[in-house]
Image (cartoon, rainbow, N blue to C red):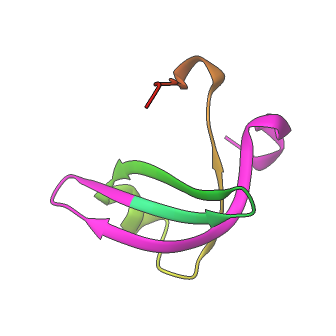
Amino acid sequence: MTIKAINVRNQFKGTIKEIIEGPVLSEIDVQTAAGVVTSVITTRSVRELELGVGSEVIAFVKSTEVSIAKL
């Protein structure tokens, strides 16, 4: 997927703040203008994309996969 294919309304440009690597999945915190966005991706993808703290990224969500819960 190219960046141009991502819906502008569902993207957050930011900088990786923290990566917690697991054996299979890794949690990535991205600092954006809207706050911190957290994503879980495969650890393999973290390595293949050469992601690290300070990397500039675009986090995006598919509207069909967003959930809201009342606190």
Pick out the residue farthest to the bottom.
54
Which quadrant does the C terminus fall into?
A: top left
Residue 29 screen position, x and y as percent: 47, 63
Residue drawn at the location 46% of the way across and 25% of the way down:
69
* Magenta-span inclusion, residue 10: yes
Left or right: 21 as drawn, with respect to 67? left
Position above or below: 13 against 40: below
The image quarter containing residue 2 is top right
- At a point 31% along the width and 58% down the height, the residue shown is 26
Q: Which residue is outermost to the top?
A: 64
Q: Residue at x 20, y 52 (%)?
A: 24
Q: Residue furthest front?
A: 71
Q: Position of residue 64 (x, y in %)?
A: 59, 17
Q: Nearer the viewer, residue 46 or 18?
A: 18
Q: Is residue 67 magenta?
A: no
Q: In the image, 33: left or right of 1?
A: right
- In the rendered image of this protein, does residue 52 appear above or below residue 34? below
Bounds of the magenta segment: 1-27
Q: Looking at the figure, which quarter contains the N terminus? A: top right
Instruction: Report the label total.
Output: 0
56 is higher (above) or lower (below) than 45? below
Q: Is residue 59 left or right of residue 68?
A: right
Q: Using the image, determine if residue 2 lies above or below residue 51.
A: above
Where residue 16 appears, x then y in whole percent? 54, 71
Specify the quadrant of the image occupied by residue 35: bottom right
Which residue sits at x=61%, y=36%?
61
Q: Horizontal and vertical percent for residue 15? A: 63, 72
